[in-house]
């Protein structure tokens, strides 16, 4: 039996805050899946931890991020096709953002979420290869999708450490795992060494020089002048987080589970993880406004991968962004679009076949909180055999009644699900 492992990014909300997006959405196909499934809940990284996507995805693919991870920066770098000079370079996940240059107060961490990839690539070109003026330091800057980027800061002559704090105040480093803060002071943070080594001190100095120079260069860039003229927020700073100096050394997922794994991934972090784990991939373009076309492409990629693999991991970004924006209407719509254009056609294609479907999320992004939280996410497993809990809908509350119970760590999920699929 084969498995499609569908992850709806940030789809879960906080039920105690009021109706959740899953409760409000008209999603007949996802509800049908739930009605034919055994269900439960999952803390993707652990109770009390509001995870970033990187650690959460690692965890739900069966790897303990506290033991086996080296930070989001190197993973996003791998997703963007970049390599690191270990010991002399550190990679960061980066956001183009909007600040008041005089006070460094952050006005929007994502430039109003309307910075196009074309704009961000032009801005990145203006600062790629930047000389930092101390410790023979330099920066490599590569834009990825929209406001997102990868920044690699290095030194030609000095060894550096990745043990430095974020300049993005919305996330706090705990080892190599960053945790979303429920509240923070909205100012660009100063990078600080997190240990007493010279290497960490040098890197913190380089990061702060980078921030200083970036603000000066970006403020007068033609792209930003045009954005201001059109009433849009300028992309006049780059916020850094989740530093890492090397790729994680992980067992390939095919060897770990003795099965062939494929992946459909849209964003650099998931692409990077798939590459690191040596998953078979079908390339898909970044998400657009035309979801009918987007999900048709992703469904085609899913079915191609299923022909030559045992497990296909599909990660759809849709619900996460409106959750961050606090836009319940758009979050509900994003779920309905996935239901209509991906899940419905998928059910038609796998009907009557020996294919199981696992649906879950990498974390909760409640529209009431506008950030990731530690809330458990729904888990539903539809098997061709007639095992089901009799639930009516795919919601957080319904899944809390399911026979799968609660997974306290995401890395517990896949081994158990694969064992269930094998059993008669």
Image (spheres, rainbow, N blue to C red):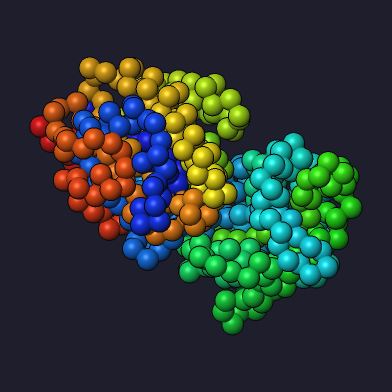
Of 288 and 202, which appears nearest the observer?
A: 288
In the displayed structure image, the side of residue 218 where residue 200 appears, left or right: left
The reply to whether residue 168 is in sight is yes
In the displayed structure image, the side of residue 209 where residue 415 appears, left or right: left
The reply to whether residue 152 is in sight is no
Query: As displayed, is residue 123 above or below residue 97?
Result: above
- Residue 94, quarter of the rendered image: bottom right
| Residue ID at (33%, 31%) | 30
| Residue ID at (44%, 55%) | 55
Q: Name the quarter where the N terminus is drawn.
A: top left
In the displayed structure image, the side of residue 280 where residue 407 appears, left or right: left
Q: Name the quarter where the C terminus is drawn.
A: top left
Q: Where's residue 339, x and y in %?
A: 41, 28
Q: Residue furthest left?
A: 424
| Residue ID at (49%, 35%) | 334
Total labels: the figure holds 0
Q: Where's residue 39, x and y in %?
A: 23, 42
| Residue ID at (61%, 42%) | 81
Of 39 and 157, which appears nearest the observer?
A: 39
Q: Where's residue 342, x and y in %?
A: 42, 25
- Residue 38, quarter of the rendered image: top left
Of 399 and 351, which appears nearest the observer?
A: 399
Q: Where's residue 422, x and y in %?
A: 17, 35
- Residue 163, quarter of the rendered image: bottom right
Query: As displayed, is residue 10 above or below residue 183?
Result: above
Q: Residue furthest front?
A: 18
């Amino acid at each position: 039996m084969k498995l499609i492992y569908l992850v709806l990014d940030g789809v879960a909300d906080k039920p105690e805050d009021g109706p959740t997006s899953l409760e409000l959405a008209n999603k007949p196909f996802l509800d049908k899946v739930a009605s034919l499934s055994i269900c439960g809940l999952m803390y993707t990284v652990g109770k009390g931890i509001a995870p970033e996507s990187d650690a959460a995805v690692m965890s739900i693919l069966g790897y303990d991020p506290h033991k086996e991870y080296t930070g989001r920066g190197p993973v996003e770098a791998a997703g963007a096709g970049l390599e690191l000079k270990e010991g002399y370079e550190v990679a960061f996940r980066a956001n183009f953002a909007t600040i008041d240059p005089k006070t460094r107060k952050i006005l929007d961490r994502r430039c109003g979420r309307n910075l196009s990839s074309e704009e961000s690539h032009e801005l990145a070109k203006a600062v790629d290869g930047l000389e930092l003026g101390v410790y023979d330091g330099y920066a490599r800057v590569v834009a990825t999708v929209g406001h997102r980027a990868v920044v690699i800061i290095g030194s030609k002559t000095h060894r550096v450490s990745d043990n430095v704090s974020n300049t993005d105040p919305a996330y706090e480093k705990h080892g190599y795992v960053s945790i979303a803060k429920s509240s923070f002071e909205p100012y660009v943070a100063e990078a600080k060494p997190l240990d007493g080594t010279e290497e960490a001190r040098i890197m913190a100095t380089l990061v702060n020089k980078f921030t200083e120079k970036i603000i000066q260069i970006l403020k007068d860039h033609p792209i930003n002048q045009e954005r201001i003229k059109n009433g849009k927020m300028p992309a006049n700073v780059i916020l850094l987080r989740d530093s890492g100096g090397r790729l994680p050394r992980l067992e390939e997922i095919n060897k770990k589970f003795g099965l062939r794994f494929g992946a459909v991934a849209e964003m650099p972090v998931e692409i990077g993880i798939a590459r690191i784990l040596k998953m078979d991939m079908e390339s898909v373009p970044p998400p657009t406004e035309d979801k009918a076309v987007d999900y048709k492409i992703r469904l085609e990629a899913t079915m191609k991968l299923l022909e030559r693999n045992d497990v296909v991991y599909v990660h759809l970004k849709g619900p996460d962004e409106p959750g961050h924006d606090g836009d319940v209407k758009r979050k509900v719509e994003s779920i309905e679009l996935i239901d209509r254009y991906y899940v419905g056609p998928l059910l038609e294609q796998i009907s009557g076949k020996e294919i199981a479907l696992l649906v879950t999320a990498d974390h909760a992004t409640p529209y009431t909180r506008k950030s990731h939280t530690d809330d458990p996410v729904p888990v539903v497993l539809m098997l061709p055999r007639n095992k089901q809990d009799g639930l009516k809908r795919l919601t957080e509350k319904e899944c809390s009644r399911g026979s799968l119970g609660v997974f306290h760590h995401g890395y517990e999920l896949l081994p158990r699900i694969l064992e269930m699929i094998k059993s008669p």
